[in-house]
Image: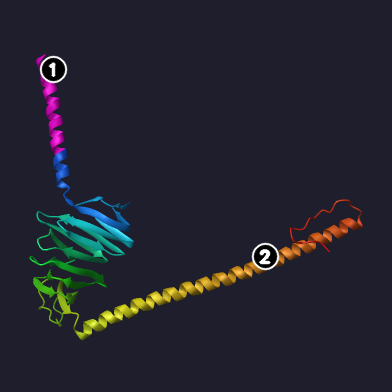
Amino acid sequence: MTRLRNTVLAVFLLLAIGICLSVSAYAGSAVVGSVAGSVNATVGGQEVVPNATIFSGDSLQVRDGVAVIALGRGSRMVFGRNSTVSFSRETDSVTAVLGQGNVSLFSPDGGAGVRVKVGEVTIVPAKGFKTMGEVAMVNGTVLVTTKEGLLRVEGDGQAVDVAKGKSIAVVPKAAGAPQGGGGAGGRGGGHTLQILSLGAGITSAGLAAWAIRDARNSRNSANASIAAANAAAAAAADAEAAALAAEEQMIAAGCALNQVANQLGMLTSPYTPPAGHTCP
């Protein structure tokens, strides 16, 4: 009897330990937020649906679409097309690690702490401000724009505040190379960060060049598509003409066969032309 009681107690103890471990593991998957809406977006390769929960460690990919993530207390992030991002939940903030693409973020005064991290660069809404801004990756350069409030850009020991209506570009730069446009001096390590105001002529010219290049690429792609469509239409027309010619030849051959059959005195013609066609 004592042995049975000990066995039962051991089983209950193991079950209790298992339940505690399960609860602990679930608690470790901290909730980041929820999906307010999405088009052509996946998490872990699975299509996301409205109100789906996003956990710390989840990876979001947006194809030709958009995804809106609500982070709590009014904060939200909107990820544009061709964006990839992973999420991390800290004690009092959520970090979105942007692999590529762009994100628009909104943080109300006193809202949940949010930040965007791109490589060595971290973008944080300033406390005490209702902040709206955009972060985008363009050819390895991080573009930061503040629509409302104040964004702080941090990286490589530097910190720059981006006020409402302002934009900056953060460019990885080899250590020891000359710094310009307001960037800080080189430090030890493989790279430093060069922070440029988009008001600078060289930066504006660079962005204009990127825009022109993208527009040219889009136009070239459109022209190529039009040329391919025209070629396909011409090929289809040629194929249709060849098919009609082949059909006419087939009808002529069949009618000639009927004439031979008539000459031989056959009661039934061996060939019947298709609807709309008659033999002479």
Q: Secondary structure at mark 1?
A: helix
In the rendered image, residue 202, in percent from the top left (x then y), is placed at: 22, 84
Which badge, 2 or 1, is on the more N-terminal residue?
A: 1
Which residue is farthest top? 1
Between residue 2 and residue 223, name the one nearer to us. Answer: 223
The residue range painted magenta reads 1-21
Q: Which residue is mark 1?
A: 4
Residue at (43, 74) in percent of width and height: 222
Q: Quadrant of the N terminus?
A: top left
Q: Residues within 10 Å of mark 1 (few under 14, many from 20)?
A: few
Residue at (59, 70) in percent of width and height: 235
Seen in the picture, residue 213 relative to 154 is either above or below; the reply is below
How far apart are labels 2 and 1 at the CA level?
88 Å
Quarter-wise, where is residue 145 in the image? bottom left
Q: Nearer the viewer, mark 2 or mark 1?
A: 2
Quarter-wise, where is residue 89 in the image? bottom left
Between residue 161 and residue 6, name the one nearer to us. Answer: 161
Q: Quadrant of the C terminus?
A: bottom right
Instruction: Say whether residue 57 is visible.
Output: no
Which residue is farthest bottom? 201
Q: Amino acid at mark 1?
A: Leu
Between residue 95 and residue 9, name the one nearer to us. Answer: 95
Q: Residues within 10 Å of mark 2 (few under 14, many from 20)?
A: few
Q: Secondary structure at mark 2?
A: helix
> Is 164 positioned to the left or the right of 66 in the image?
left
Please tell me the numbered disc located at residue 243: 2
Magenta segment includes 7: yes
Please tell me the numbered disc located at residue 159: none
